[in-house]
Amino acid sequence: MEYDKKKIAVLTSGGDASGMNACIRAVVRYAMAQGYTVYGVRRGYVGLIEDDIFEMQYNSVSNCVHTGGTILRTGRSKDFCNPEVMKKAVDNLLKRGCNHLVVIGGDGSFRGLQDIHKMTDMRVIGIPATIDNDMGYTDFTIGFDTACNTVIDAILRLRDTITSHDRIMILEVMGRHCGDIAINSALAGGAEYVIVGEVPVDVDAIADSVKRGFDKGKTSTIIVLAEARNDLKDELIEKVGAATGRRVNHVSLSYMQRGGYPAMADRVLASRMAVRAVELIDEGQSGRVVGVNGNDIIDMSVGEALKVPKKFNQKIYDIATKISK
Ligand code: F6P
């Protein structure tokens, strides 16, 4: 089949992350400036399967750089793991003469991208977007900074009320298996304790330490609890409450962390990564994903990227735990 060299499609997939719209906007605007026709695929791989595809215009992305969520909407599709379904889905773009696709999403979305690259004519480039920051090959993913800022804001608000009541607050945050949101937000927000899946936890020791803090005159304590260890919630409430004789409250920020206007860091990162993704397509590359290393935008093959283990940032954890009690 003949494909038009100047056609490109874009989709967002998996959990939404603030900054996805800034990323879509930059893909659309930069690609159009290079003479591409751009298609938007709604609801990620679901929309690809269902042929929910439309031609985007310059103003399709007007007034979205500052908004959370994704104007293309998103989805998680189990069906897409079936190679037959995947090939048929990709045909919906190929029949439009379009054999370039930019996938904005997390590691699950990148696995789909890898299959497309291996099994079809589609040329694919990935951009990492997830609040979890759980992809080892890139220092940061789009949406992480905004999610941390939301947690920090919550820590400040919770501090006001618990200080007024001499209480303890357990603040549960998202991140799936990754403790990055927890440790960075705990450090930046001044929480006293942070519990993550990557480090063994001694709940009795935490309870004793919280008690000693109050004995020395503290008027409040915040424990940031990562999603990976939310199994400890009840034990913490019971043991910290018993050790201190104070009320222990629990708040889960949950999906609040995914929404809201994107921070500057996410808008800029999203725009830089989007431009590099379009450049890679223009260079005729496929099966690659962009990322950031230090202050440089990098790219590597999706296969390599998925193999890089996510390293736990022990230094940030140590700083957060050493200076906050
Ligand atoms: O990957 C982003 C994330 O928000 C995780 O932190 C969380 O575990 C998961 O998605 C929740 O997924 P869902 O939207 O399917 O409930």
Image (cartoon, grey):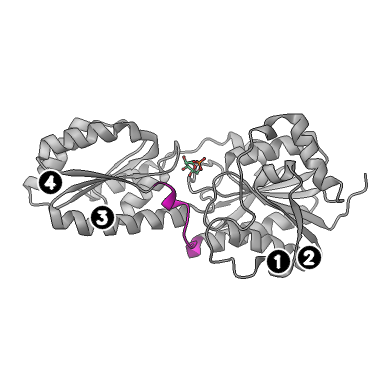
Kindly identify which residue carries mark 2.
34
Q: Which percent across, then down, holds residue 234?
A: 26, 33
The kind of residue on which mark 3 rests is: Leu
The kind of residue on which mark 2 rests is: Gln
The kind of residue on which mark 4 rests is: Gly
Kindly report the distance in space between the C-alpha atoms of the residues bearing marks 1 and 2. Answer: 9 Å
Q: Are marks 4 and 3 in contact (CB under 8 Å)?
A: no
Kindly identify which residue carries mark 1.
29
Q: Which percent across, then down, holds residue 173?
A: 37, 45
| The magenta stretch spans residue 258 | yes
Judge depth for marks 1 and 4 and give the one in front: 1
Judge depth for marks 1 and 2 and give the one in front: 1
Q: Which mark is residue 213?
A: 4
Query: Which badge, 1 or 2, is on the more N-terminal residue?
Result: 1
Judge depth for marks 4 and 3 and give the one in front: 3
Kindly report the distance in space between the C-alpha atoms of the residues bearing marks 2 and 3. Answer: 48 Å
Q: Are marks 2 and 3 in contact (CB under 8 Å)?
A: no
When the figure is inspected, residue 37 is found, relative to residue 286, above or below; the finding is below
Residue at (51%, 50%) from the top-left corner?
A: 140
Examine the image and state in which quarter residue 252 appears. Answer: top left
Q: Is disc 4 placed on a helix, strand or loop? A: helix
Kindly report the distance in space between the C-alpha atoms of the residues bearing marks 1 and 4. Answer: 54 Å
Q: Is disc 1 placed on a helix, strand or loop? A: helix
Kindly identify which residue carries mark 3.
158
Query: Which badge, 1 or 3, is on the more N-terminal residue?
Result: 1
Q: Nearer the viewer, residue 125 or 158?
A: 158
Query: Which badge, 1 or 4, is on the more N-terminal residue?
Result: 1
Side of 131 relative to 318 (left or right): right
- Residue extent of the magenta highlight: 254-265
